[in-house]
Each structure stands twice: as structure tokens, then as C-alpha cells.
Image (spheres, rainbow, N blue to C red):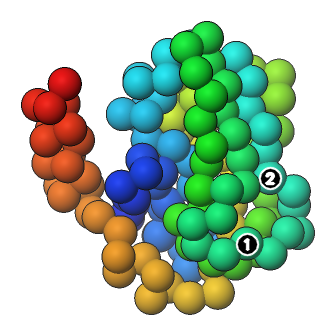
Amino acid sequence: QKRYSEDHEWIDTTNSESARFGITNFAAKALGDVVYVELPTVGSEVSKGDTIAAVESVKSASDIMTPASGTILEVNEELDNNPALINSGAEGEGWIASIKTSSTAEWEDLMDAEAYRKYTEELDSHD
């Protein structure tokens, strides 16, 4: 099950041992064509809300915050050669990293898919 932050990051909470995360399709669409991704360092300890990666597009650059605390287990090295994977599948093949989370309680603050959909619709209506 995926959970979503107000900063447009998602985390797949299906496996509490290692949870993949990245930016949402909504964020990828807003960024436009992604040309570079700065990935976090495997083994680094992170706290929820830390800036751990960056995504640059033809339009802008955006920091990526971790949606949970823990240790970075793996990064999506495919993004080094093909950053556009974020555009074609931000919530799938364009994942950024996986994390061994220290507390699943942090996920309770995050939105489920329906709540996130409503949140983004509200944002769209203010444009």
C-alpha cells in the first residue's frame, strides 16, 4: 500500500523491512521532463523530512524529502542513465530509493491514495 506526503513523495508500505519511495506522478508532471536525478547515499541514516535527493527538469529543480526515518538500503541506479523514468513511471520504475524504516508509526501522518487524490485536486483548483 502506498502512502503520500503533502510534499508529493510516496512510500510503498507493503513491506515494513524495506520501503521504496519516490516522487508522485503529480510532482513529475509539474516538473516536466526530468534531466538529472541526484540520488541519496546507500547506508546513510536519514530522518523523516530530511532532504536526501534532488530532481532537475528542464523547468526547475526540486528537493526530495524522505517520507520516513531509517537507513537507505538501495538507490535506483537506472535513474543515472535514464532520469526520464521518473516521467514515464514516477510511482513505479522511477522510484528513487528504498529505506529500512525505523518506525512504521511515521506512516500514520501520510495520506492514503484517496486522500492524496483529493489533496491534489484541491491544489489544481487553485491554479
Circles 2 and 1, Cβ within 8 Å, touching? The answer is yes
* Residue 86, horizontal then vertical, whole percent: 58, 29
Q: Quadrant of the N terminus?
A: bottom left
Q: Is residue 83 above or below residue 122?
A: above
Relative horizontal placement of residue 7, taking residue 67 as reference (left or right): left
Q: Quadrant of residue 50?
A: bottom right
| Frontmost residue, 96 versus 56 | 56
Q: Residue at x 60, y 62 (%)?
A: 66
Q: Label 2 crowding class (10 Å Cα cut-off): few <14, some 14-19, many 20+? A: many
Q: Residue furthest front?
A: 126
Horizontally, is 127 left or right of 23 in the view? Answer: left
Earlier along the polypeptide chain: callout 2 or callout 1?
Answer: 2
**Residue 23 placement (x, y as % from top left):** 51, 43
Q: Which of the image's four quarters has the C terminus? A: top left
Question: Count of labels shown?
Answer: 2
Q: Amino acid at mark 2?
A: Pro
At 72% across and 55% down in the image, what residue appears?
A: 52
- Image position, residue 75 (x, y; %): 78, 50
Observer able to see residue 88: no
Mark 1 neighbour density, 10 Å: few (under 14) some (14–19) many (20 or more): many
Residue at position x 70%, y 17% in the image? 35
Circle 1 SS class: strand
> Percent x, y for residue 119?
20, 49
Q: Which mark is residue 116?
A: none
Q: Quadrant of residue 78?
A: top right
Query: Which numbered dot is residue 46?
Result: 1
- Is 37 situated above or below 67? above
**How far is disc 2 from disc 1 in space, using C-alphas?**
10 Å
- The three-letter code of the residue at mark 1 reads Val
**Residue 40 shows which numbered tag?**
2
Whether residue 16 is visible here, answered yes or no, is yes
